[in-house]
Image (cartoon, rainbow, N blue to C red):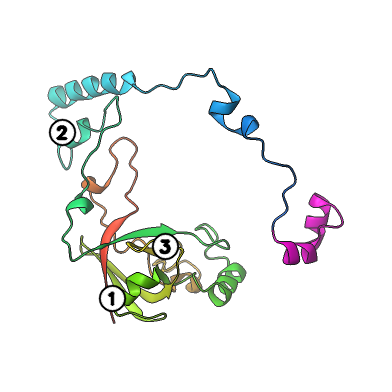
Amino acid sequence: MDRVLRSKHGDEHGLDWFKDSGILLDKPVNAAAFYGAAKFPKAKFPIYYEEYAVWREWLAQEIKDKGINYKPSNDFVLNSYQPLPTWREHPEHTAPATYPLYAINFKIMELFYGNIDQPWMNEWAFKNNPYATAILINPATAAGLGLKDGDQVEAQSFTGGKTQGPIKLTNLVMPNLIAIGGAWGARSVHIYPGAQRGPHFNSPWKLSPEFLDPLRGGFDLTTRAQLVKV
């Protein structure tokens, strides 16, 4: 690593330099060179996406002609083809008040997902990164729930899913959130066993049509949840 850093950033910027100084900025950031509106001040950005209106009419005719029945409903799918940004209420917005927290995903520096079963990086992160296999929660929120750092909890979704893990108190998350790492708790028997440790981010979520984006198949990555001490 020292040789790579010196080769890329100069002989004076080796591993020891980065340990002491942290981040190296090679060049000042020039907004005009990188950001669209500054780089192309006369560019026009569309607000009305007329192709979505065209596709909606085409799909509506296909549904009628072929007797298609989409889940959860044909209207749910068709109403996704809007030429203008349109608010749509999500099931989590009407979740019971007993599920006051929004559960979100986060990634750590050492691991994303594809390398979660790389033994060296997995073990390093597990032993040295206090956030890796924890459920992150704001200190004020934890205090209100009578929880302290390291308590074992079960994160329960309003959809019925759940996962368990220790909590980590941190101001990195807002008071109305909990954050669960997105690579741990894997369930595959073919993956490195170390990757099976920790809370499983997908378990609290529900995989059903009302939680999917009909346009691209995108899966919701938030849910309303509550914490129960175990």
CA gap, disc 2 and disc 1: 40 Å
- Where residue 197 appears, as percent x and y from the top left, is 44, 74
> What residue is rendered at 45% in x and 59% in y?
106
Frontmost of labels 2 and 1 is 1
> What residue is rendered at 55% in x and 60% in y?
115
165 to the left or right of 61: right
Q: Main secondary structure of the magenta part?
A: helix
- Where residue 168 appears, as percent x and y from the top left, is 43, 74
Q: Earlier in the sequence, mark 3 or mark 1?
A: 1
The amino acid at mark 1 is: Leu
* Vertical relation: 135 (above or below) 28: below
Q: Which residue is mark 3?
A: 173
Q: Which residue is mark 2?
A: 75
- Where residue 100 appears, as percent x and y from the top left, is 24, 63
Q: Which residue is mark 1?
A: 145
> What residue is rendered at 80% in x and 51% in y?
9
CA gap, disc 2 and disc 3: 36 Å
- Disc 2 crowd, CA 10 A, few/some/many (<14, 14-19, 20+): few
Q: Earlier in the sequence, mark 2 or mark 3?
A: 2
Q: Which residues are magenta?
A: 1-22
228 to the left or right of 17: left
221 to the left or right of 109: left
The amino acid at mark 2 is: Asp
